[in-house]
Amino acid sequence: QVQLVESGGGVVQPGKSLRLSCAASGFTFSSYGLHWVRQAPGKGLEWVAVIIDDGSDQFYADSVKGRFTISRDNSKNMLYLQMNSLRVEDTAVYYCAKDRRLGGYDFDHWGQGTLVTVSS
Amino acid sequence: EIVMTQSPATLSVSPGERATLSCRASQSVSSNLAWYQQKPGQAPRLLIYSASTRATGIPARFSGSGSGTEFTLTISSLQSEDFAVYYCQQYHAWPPLTFGGGTKVEIK
């Protein structure tokens, strides 16, 4: 079965960096776009970024553009989110999510999430 | 950016009753709309895609309808496990992909 397992969350000071990872299994990793979606405490869902199946293109929410970088390693079935210049408002649970179909951009599987807390 | 607006914010329903949740898009998203269910402490779960197609394993009591800018998620007879927060998401025009603010379905 499909599994997505995030890691790398924690407490970090404003302005610092953090890298999240998502280990995937149970599907043909290189055939699907992958996303990061976040949820601030007690709030709704916010899409963060997507990387297409072969990794050749990425798109970002305006709120993270220029600070976050999404990447993937198709040889290791791994998805990453490099987060630089972190702000207090980046505090959230970060989920990795898989496209339901190639280029579909709705999400049929999600990880359990990893909490990032940005605080001094 | 397409803004998704869900109503009501909270819906109080008794078990066995019907629940009707609404989602409105600020411009047409055709049928490129999904619904998710999220329970406390859990990741969202895909319920409906393409506005009206149930995802794998989703019970028939969940149904979606609509196109363009107006969409509805109906739960025909609420079970105890259905009390949760529901989100709509458009994937017609992006970036960004956008979600509604959510509707919490609570026990009346």
Image: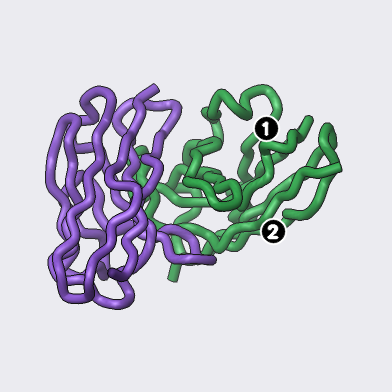
Q: Is residue A88 above or below residue B86?
A: above
| A76 over A15 or under it: above or below | below
**Which one of the lettered chains is coloured purple?**
B
What is the tally of numbered marks visible in this picture?
2
Q: Which chain comes out green in the rendered image?
A: A
Subunit bearing disc 1: A
The image quadrant that residue B99 belongs to is top left
Query: Is disc 1 placed on a helix, strand or loop?
Result: strand
The crowd level at tag 1 (other Cα within 10 Å; few <14, some 14-19, many 20+) is: many
Q: Nearer the viewer, residue A91 or B47?
A: A91
- Percent coordinates x, y for residue B20 in the rendering: 18, 54
- Numbered circle sitting on residue A68: 1
Residue occupying the point 34% across, 65% down: B106
Q: Residue type at mark 2? A: Ser
Mark number, residue B67: none
x%, y% of residue A53? 48, 41
Question: Disc 1 marks which amino acid?
Answer: Phe
Q: Which subunit holds the residue at mark 2?
A: A
The image position of residue B104, as x and y in percent, is 36, 56
Question: Crowdedness of circle 2 by 10 Å Cα count: few (<14), some, many (20+)?
Answer: some
Residue bearing the label numbered 2: A7
- Residue at position x 69%, y 58% in the image: A7
Quadrant placement of the C terminus of chain B: bottom left
Task: Check if mark 2 and mark 1 are on a common chain.
Answer: yes
